[in-house]
Image (cartoon, grey):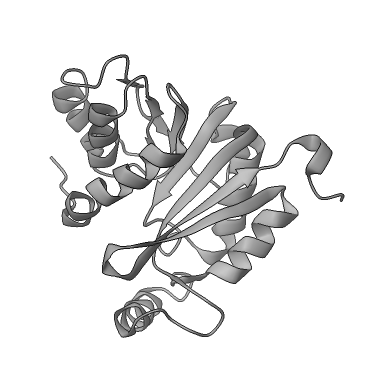
């Protein structure tokens, strides 16, 4: 099966933060599930969790892990849905909401810069009022990186493809706010990563267009 060492390292710290924010029995869409390690780990520890994995096709590796590890040993009432193909730039591929949360890890710097606003917009469409968008990964603040390793990683990504790169948290916050997503937390995480938590505002307190 596809295995991600990064997922293995970060899944427990991410779980500890998600446990603080997700409602009991919440329905969560994961964008970019990759190896499926996060899906399995969260469902093994969060009772009642309803986790919807998704990724770009093909989904063979993701489906294989869920077949072998995602059907037993889960927390009481938790379940993992069959994964769905999702390209965030194609609105017709987004699953039907509402969701209590949309979670994605280490995808914003990999997807093209033009796709990031579409990730935010898609989440805003699917989230229930007060639902959460949780973005995990490295982020910079304007022209400032939070660590030399992140600056080196940014340069490495852009050398591979100029459309990739570590995203600006301030810019993400402004884009999200224009969609009715308010930043609630900016949590420092291991290895110079962060977990940004946005909340979808109710219609009455969403920004006017």
- Residue 194 falls in which quadrant of the image? bottom left
Residue 86 visible in the shown view? no
Of 56 and 52, nearer the camera is 52
In what quadrant of the picture does the N terminus appear? top left
Q: Residue furthest front?
A: 20
Q: Residue at x 37, y 83 (%)?
A: 151
- In the rendered structure, the answer to whether residue 179 lies left or right of residue 91 reads right
Return the x and y of residue 88 as percentages of the image width and height. Answer: 53, 45
Q: Residue at x 60, y 50 (%)?
A: 120
Of 144 and 118, nearer the camera is 144
- Residue 28 falls in which quadrant of the image? top left
Of 50 and 189, nearer the camera is 189
- Residue 74 falls in which quadrant of the image? top left
Q: Residue at x 35, y 65 (%)?
A: 193
Determine whether 128 is above or below 104 in the image. above
Return the x and y of residue 105 as percentages of the image width and height. Answer: 37, 52
Q: Residue furthest right?
A: 209
């Amino acid at each position: 099966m596809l295995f991600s060492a990064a997922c293995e390292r970060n899944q427990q710290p991410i779980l500890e933060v998600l446990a603080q924010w997700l409602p009991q029995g919440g329905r969560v869409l994961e964008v970019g599930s990759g190896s499926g390690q996060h899906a399995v780990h969260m469902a093994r520890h969060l009772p009642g969790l309803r986790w919807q994995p998704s990724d770009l096709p093909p989904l063979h590796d993701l489906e294989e892990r869920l077949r072998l590890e995602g059907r037993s040993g889960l927390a009481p009432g938790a379940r993992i849905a069959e994964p769905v193909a999702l390209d965030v730039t194609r609105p017709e591929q987004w699953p039907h909401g509402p969701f209590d949360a949309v979670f994605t890890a280490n995808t914003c710097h990999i997807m093209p810069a033009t796709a990031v606003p579409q990730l935010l917009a898609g989440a805003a469409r699917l989230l229930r009022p007060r639902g959460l968008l949780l973005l995990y990964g490295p982020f910079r603040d304007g022209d400032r990186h939070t660590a030399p390793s992140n600056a080196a990683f940014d340069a490495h990504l852009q050398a591979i493809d100029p459309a990739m790169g570590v995203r600006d948290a301030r810019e993400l916050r402004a884009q999200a706010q224009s969609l009715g997503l308010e930043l609630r937390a900016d949590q420092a995480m291991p290895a110079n990563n962060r977990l940004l938590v946005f909340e979808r505002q109710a219609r009455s307190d969403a920004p006017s267009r």
